[in-house]
Amino acid sequence: MSALPPVRRSVLRMAAYQPPLGNRRGALRLDFNENTVGCSRRALDALRRLTQEEAAVYPEYERIQQRLARGFGVPAGQLLLTAGTDDALRLAVDTVVEPGSLVVLVEPTFAMYRFYAERAGARLLVLRYGAQMQFPEPSVLRALAQRPRLFVLANPNNPTGTLVPLAVLRRILQAAPRTWVLVDEAYSEFSDVTVLPWVRRYPQLLVTRTFSKAFGLAGLRVGCLFAHRRAAPLFRRAQSPYPVATPALVAAEQALRDRRFLREYLRAVRTGKQILVAGLERLRIPQFPSAANFVLVDFGRRAEAVLRALRRQGILLRDRRSDFGRVGYVRITVGTPAQTRRLVRALEALW
């Protein structure tokens, strides 16, 4: 058999990203930070109203883009529609990162930042959160003095749940006028902290948002990349013409308009988090404060047995040992109060 034609050397050096996506149907899925109640009924109704004609033609973005931009409080020209945050990250990296250019990350964080940077052949400078998941601001500012091409930060961060204050983000942007600074706000609805209005002020700032978390549309893959008015056309130039399908667009529009659904879900998550934290404290399970819809805990050497036992009961949590180099760290998505009480009861029986 003949050999395959060549592929990029950066791809050959990469490790494949393999999320555990099988055997989840019917389980209490507290492993992927998804909305545990589903999406807005208005979003579902919009999907049901799709016509044969709409399915047969390419999506028209202008009207929905204007409405989404109005909902996010930015000019339409500063919003690019993407197939979830993953696509927004890919677009950002493909546009600004060249082989050999420097990219700065703070890990542990969302694995796709490293994935896309490595695929592009970037040089990585990887900093670390502290033992108590504190953000290493001094190290970040020193790294930015090297004028990297791109700095990526999740806020709140996944899997630590930590939130970088706005004052720190402002210092980062002031220290990096020649570096693209991408702030991934996938979980901003839970923290109520955002730098999205700053895209008008800082030409190097990029912000990503997703409808996969708070809005419950992970299965439809729709997100946004926001950029300064002078920068947005550069990213639009590098983007494929129809990255988001019509069903995702119409569902996203209605999901963003359904403020009542969002308020009620965020209230349920806040209550669920209080129940979870209280239960973990009673069991003396170490945890880290979180501004998102998940909590990072340390089950220690009992982690594997606990995760297996919970899986047998139909409760899925996310093992994050690979982020920390040892067994024990587990990320728990916060469900509704009833879902969280079920988890806490199961933990009490196992612990």
Image (spheres, helix red, strand yellow):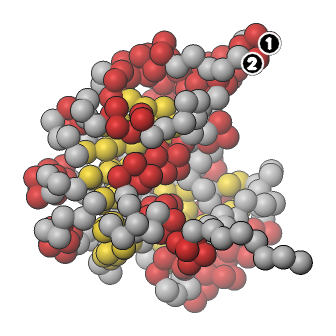
Q: Residue at x 42, y 54 (%)?
A: 93
Q: Residue at x 32, y 67 (%)?
A: 101
Q: Are marks 2 and 1 in contact (CB under 8 Å)?
A: yes
Instruction: Tell me: 224 left or right of 347.
Output: left
The quarter of the rendered structure image containing the N terminus is bottom right
Q: Residue furthest right?
A: 1
Picture layout, residue 101 above or below residue 173 = below
Residue nearest the observer in this picture, 283 or 141? 141
Q: Is residue 264 visible?
A: no
- From mark 2 to mark 1, how far is it between C-alphas? 5 Å
- Asked which secondary structure carries label 2, the reply is helix
Q: Position of residue 149 (x, y in %)?
A: 28, 60
Q: Position of residue 177 (x, y in %)?
A: 14, 52
- Asked which secondary structure carries label 1, the reply is helix
The disc label shown at residue 52, or none? 1
Q: Position of residue 162 (x, y in %)?
A: 34, 61
Q: Residue 251 sits in which quadrant?
A: top right
Residue nearest the observer in this picture, 217 or 259? 217
Residue nearest the observer in this picture, 97 or 188? 97
Label 1: how many residues lie within 10 Å, few (<14), some (14-19) or many (20+)? few
Q: Residue at x 40, y 48 (%)?
A: 95
The quarter of the rendered structure image containing the C terminus is bottom right
List the residue tagged with mark 2: 55
Tell me which amino acid carries mark 2.
Answer: Ala
Instruction: Tell me: 331 left or right of 20.
Output: left
Q: Position of residue 219 (x, y in %)?
A: 67, 40
Q: Is residue 199 visible?
A: yes
Picture layout, residue 68 above or below residue 154 = above
Q: Residue at x 17, y 70 (%)?
A: 146
Q: How many marks?
A: 2
Tell me which amino acid carries mark 1.
Answer: Gln
Label 2: how many residues lie within 10 Å, few (<14), some (14-19) or many (20+)? few
